[in-house]
């Protein structure tokens, strides 16, 4: 071959053109396939739970509620990001937004972004002292889930004199689903708070006796709050779906009691918070009325020293199996100088008689004190007082089939021998606000708000190592791993030099 002869081309011009077109068409086809897959995926979105960690897996009831959402629901996580429960909240609500595009989630860290935090607090009229919460806003209404409602706790360490309170379960899904379900309700029920006898006032901001936080809590549950005075003419209004009698200090007269009795006989719902301490150990007339419904209100104070922090208060963890308190089995109620509330012994057992069921009681070391010492403190009267598990609250139901949703005209009553535990300062302690929520949901027959979604257990993992094992781990982490990198680097350097 001559030196100036060039080799023939590997491909002819037509061949190169064909290869180029083939590559171009392949790229276009690949892009079209990607676009088609994304188009279909966007309209048929499905997430799969591959891990054994079910904290972020939505239950069937939650999915049914989310399917019913037609308008936008804005969820604001007003939380300190360093709170242990924040990651659980954010992860779970992300699943809500994936399952329902109408749910929009926004996170506001009020510590790192104080300006936005203050705007959220002002917009939703939130108390400054109780900041960590999740706000659901939709259909012109708002629901608030507070940080102290989101977890179950083990209080045994605290009651034993220590400071160790462990979080045992996360209840975010039940509360978040209940909040969204509340936003979907068309017509809000109306609650009337009885006034005129020294009751707690829904407009009072006093920390010890005011009920302004309780009033806002009802409004956040999509309940219209009004006040009611029964002096003079007129009965309880027809739109009253819940009557709240909270801590009367003075007695109701005969006419007023007849009006309340007539309301209950016609299928009324009443939340009775009847403190013997606030009435200064005087009867208010509610004692006789409640006895007609199979409830005995004790003229006493109840103490339980092993479950007390300040002697006259009480941490209650002894619950029955009633739907109101069943979700609280691992939590405590904080009560202040309660009185005993007993189911009436020997009450009529006919089919239409009221069914009275205990809600919670003291521990086995509880006792009643119906007398007063010279200094005014409660003391035991051996002739009439009791020892053991003293009942502190009951639920009464009449006119419906037990275990079935209450029919129209049925009566429901919840009676608690205390009212201060729902005042502004104490309502946010322990599980008090959660009990109030569960009691009101049962009274108004809101089964979708009672839960039905089990709390997610919080697992603790501990690695126990001896001193020698800790030393071995330390040498592996500080010596072996960095040393291996150095050795590999040295070998690579030596090979390159060779």
Image (spheres, rainbow, N blue to C red):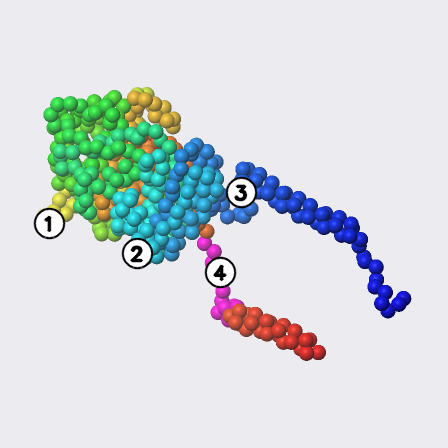
Q: Residue furthest front?
A: 4
* Stretch in magenta: 460-473
- Residue hosting label 4: 463
Q: Which residue is mark 3?
A: 47
Mark 2 or 4: in front is: 4
For residue 362, side relative to residue 150 (left or right): left
Q: Is residue 470 magenta?
A: yes
At 55% from the left and 37% from the top, the residue drawn is 44
Q: Nearer the viewer, residue 16 or 399?
A: 16
Single out the residue that lies furthest toward the right. Answer: 1
- Looking at marks 3 and 1 on the same chain, the residue that comes earlier in the sequence is marked by 3
Q: Are marks 4 and 1 in contact (CB under 8 Å)?
A: no
Residue denoted by label 2: 161
Q: Position of residue 151 (x, y in %)?
A: 38, 47
The vertical placement of 1 against 289, above or below, is below
Mark 4 and mark 3: Cα distance apart in space = 33 Å
Q: Earlier in the sequence, mark 1 or mark 2?
A: 2
């Amino acid at each position: 071959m001559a030196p100036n002869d060039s080799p023939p081309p590997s491909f002819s011009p037509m061949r190169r053109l064909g290869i180029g077109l083939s590559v171009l068409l392949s790229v276009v086809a690949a892009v079209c396939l990607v676009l088609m897959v994304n188009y279909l995926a966007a309209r048929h979105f499905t997430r799969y739970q591959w891990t054994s960690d079910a904290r972020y897996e939505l239950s069937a009831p939650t999915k049914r509620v989310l399917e019913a959402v037609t308008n936008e629901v804005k969820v604001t996580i007003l939380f300190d990001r360093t709170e242990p429960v924040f990651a659980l909240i954010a992860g779970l609500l992300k699943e809500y937004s994936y399952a329902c595009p109408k749910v929009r989630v926004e996170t506001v860290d009020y510590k790192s972004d104080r300006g936005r935090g203050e705007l959220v607090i002002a917009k939703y009229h939130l108390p400054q002292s109780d900041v960590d919460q999740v706000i659901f806003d939709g259909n012109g209404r708002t629901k608030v889930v507070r940080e102290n409602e989101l977890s179950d706790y083990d209080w045994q360490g605290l009651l034993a004199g220590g400071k160790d309170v462990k979080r045992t379960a996360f209840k975010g899904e039940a509360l978040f689903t209940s909040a969204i379900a509340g936003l979907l309700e068309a017509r809000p029920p109306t609650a009337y708070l009885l006034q005129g006898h020294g009751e707690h006032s829904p407009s009072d901001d006093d920390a010890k006796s005011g009920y302004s936080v309780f009033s806002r809590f009802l409004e956040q549950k999509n309940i219209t709050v009004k006040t009611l005075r029964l002096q003079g003419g007129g009965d309880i209004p027809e739109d009253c779906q819940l009557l709240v009698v909270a801590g009367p200090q003075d007695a109701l007269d005969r006419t007023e009691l007849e009006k309340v009795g007539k309301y209950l006989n016609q299928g009324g719902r009443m939340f009775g918070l009847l403190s013997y301490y606030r009435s200064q150990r005087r009867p208010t007339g509610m004692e006789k009325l409640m006895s007609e419904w199979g409830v005995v209100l004790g003229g006493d104070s109840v103490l339980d020293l092993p479950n007390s922090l300040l002697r006259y208060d009480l941490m209650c963890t002894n619950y029955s199996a009633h739907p109101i308190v069943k979700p609280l089995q691992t939590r405590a109620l904080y009560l202040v100088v309660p009185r005993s509330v007993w189911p009436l012994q020997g009450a009529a057992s006919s089919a239409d008689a009221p069914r009275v069921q205990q809600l919670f009681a003291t521990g086995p070391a509880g006792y009643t004190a119906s007398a007063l010492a010279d200094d005014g403190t409660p003391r035991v009267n051996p002739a009439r007082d009791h020892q053991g598990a003293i009942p502190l609250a009951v639920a009464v139901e009449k006119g419906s089939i037990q275990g079935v949703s209450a029919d129209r005209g049925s009566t429901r009553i919840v009676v608690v021998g205390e009212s201060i535990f729902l005042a502004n300062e104490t309502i946010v302690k322990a599980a008090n606000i959660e009990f109030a929520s569960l009691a009101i949901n049962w009274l108004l027959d809101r089964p979708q708000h009672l839960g039905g979604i089990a709390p997610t257990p919080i697992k603790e993992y501990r690695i126990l190592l001896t001193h020698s094992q800790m030393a071995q781990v330390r040498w592996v982490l500080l010596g072996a791993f960095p040393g291996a990198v150095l050795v590999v680097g040295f070998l690579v350097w030596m090979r390159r030099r060779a």
